[in-house]
């Protein structure tokens, strides 16, 4: 598959999706959103792909937001459509991917860029990365899930301040807030991210997709616990659980088949 605004490569079963508009700081225009949707479908459907990394081209930006130049012609209806389609076709699809998708944030992650990183299963950032939801500077609010995912991650009060001030925070502060899992040098960003994914590749793929499903359905009520119980039970109908348990008992290396 060839893309106009994305670079993709498959390296050791990791699909690397690079948003490639460095001259516009990788801003998300309509084509990027459409192509991201297709690229995420590839993650779902290509059996060679075990996990994916989303990153930005160049050393300056991951993604500096939705493409502001497209906003002038918008009204309420087209604005709502943009947010709904983007959320359904890209952000929710990333979040609910049965295979891990990790953001390697290599610079500015602003607006839709911050939301894109938040939709991924977790975030590794380079030390020059900056996070922010500056939509209020334009008279807007986040529209790709930022108010929801950020609030769940950092809590109501921090989310309120972060989104109402529109201020950028540095990678280290984002790590302290729990937005970022690890901060590394830009040179090491992709290698460190790949290393974590290679560890995950050694685990049972069906168990990994259930982990994603159950954590995404996190719920303080009994419903969350009940869902975990159901998914835990389902693991016992996989061949991999027999392989995992037998390998442990026989003190041998495990060989998961994803079945
Ligand atoms: N949409 C469209 N174009 C964007 C963009 C966006 N979100 N962010 C950056 N660009 C473009 C700039 O217009 C500029 O294009 P030009 O060279 O044709 O004029 C190019 O990318 C480089 O950006 P520039 O602003 O010159 O870089 P900078 O280093 O001075 O500033 C930022 C970097 C990130 C602080 C600044 O670009 C910015 O504030 N961007 C918008 C962030 C934002 O509000 N995002 C949320 C959108 S809802």
Image (cartoon, grey):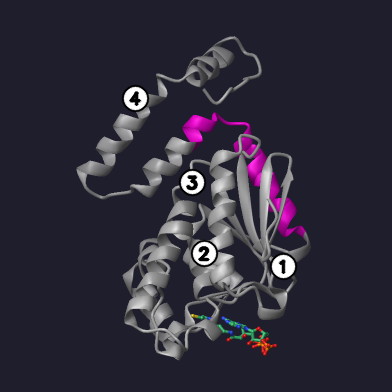
| First of labels 2, 4 by sequence position | 2
The reply to whether the C-beta atoms of the residues labelled 3 and 2 are less than 8 Å apart is: no
| First of labels 2, 1 by sequence position | 1
- In three-dimensional space, the C-alpha distance between marks 2 and 1, rounded to whole angstroms, equals 15 Å
Residue 57, label in figure: 1
Q: Residues within 10 Å of mark 2 (few under 14, many from 20)?
A: many
The reply to whether the C-beta atoms of the residues labelled 2 and 4 are less than 8 Å apart is: no
Q: Is residue 204 magenta?
A: yes
From this viewpoint, which residue is outermost toward the left?
A: 222
| Disc nearest the viewer among 4 and 3 | 3
What residue is shown with label 4?
Answer: 233
Q: Quadrant of residue 28?
A: bottom right
| First of labels 1, 3 by sequence position | 1
Residue drawn 52% across the image and 76% down it: 66
| Disc nearest the viewer among 4 and 1 | 1
Cβ at disc 4 under 8 Å from ligand 1? no
Q: Residues within 10 Å of mark 4 (few under 14, many from 20)?
A: few
Answer whether residue 240 is visible to the viewer in this image.
Answer: yes
Residue 97, label in figure: 3
Q: Is residue 159 above or below residue 15?
A: below
| First of labels 4, 3 by sequence position | 3
Magenta residues, start to end: 188-208
What residue is shown with label 2?
Answer: 116
Q: Is residue 90 magenta?
A: no
Q: Is residue 214 above or below residue 70?
A: above
The reply to whether the C-beta atoms of the residues labelled 4 and 3 are less than 8 Å apart is: no
Where residue 161 sits in the image (x, y, percent)? 39, 80
Answer whether residue 180 is visible to the viewer in this image.
Answer: no
């Amino acid at each position: 598959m060839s893309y106009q605004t994305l670079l993709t490569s498959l390296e050791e079963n990791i699909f690397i999706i690079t948003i490639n508009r460095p001259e516009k700081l990788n801003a998300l225009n309509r084509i990027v959103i459409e192509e991201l949707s297709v690229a995420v479908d590839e993650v779902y459907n290509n059996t060679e792909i075990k996990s994916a990394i989303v990153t930005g081209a160049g050393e300056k930006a991951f993604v500096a937001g939705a493409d502001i130049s497209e906003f002038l012609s918008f009204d309420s209806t087209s604005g709502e459509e943009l947010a709904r389609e983007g959320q359904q076709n890209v952000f929710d699809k990333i979040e609910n991917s049965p295979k891990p998708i990790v953001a390697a944030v290599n610079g500015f992650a602003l607006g839709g860029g911050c939301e894109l990183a938040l939709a991924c299963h977790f975030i590794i950032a380079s030390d020059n990365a900056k996070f922010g939801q500056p939509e209020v500077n334009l008279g807007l609010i986040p529209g790709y899930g930022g108010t929801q995912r950020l609030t769940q991650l950092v809590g109501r009060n921090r989310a309120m301040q972060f989104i109402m001030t529109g201020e950028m925070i540095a990678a280290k502060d984002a790590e302290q807030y729990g937005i970022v899992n690890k901060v590394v040098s830009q040179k090491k960003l992709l290698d460190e991210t790949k290393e974590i994914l290679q560890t995950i590749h050694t685990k049972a793929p069906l168990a990994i997709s259930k982990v994603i499903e159950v954590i995404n359905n996190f719920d303080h009520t009994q419903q969350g616990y009940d869902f975990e119980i159901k998914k835990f039970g389902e693991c016992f109908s996989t061949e991999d659980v027999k392989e995992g348990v037998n390998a442990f008992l026989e003190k041998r290396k495990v060989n998961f088949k994803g079945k």
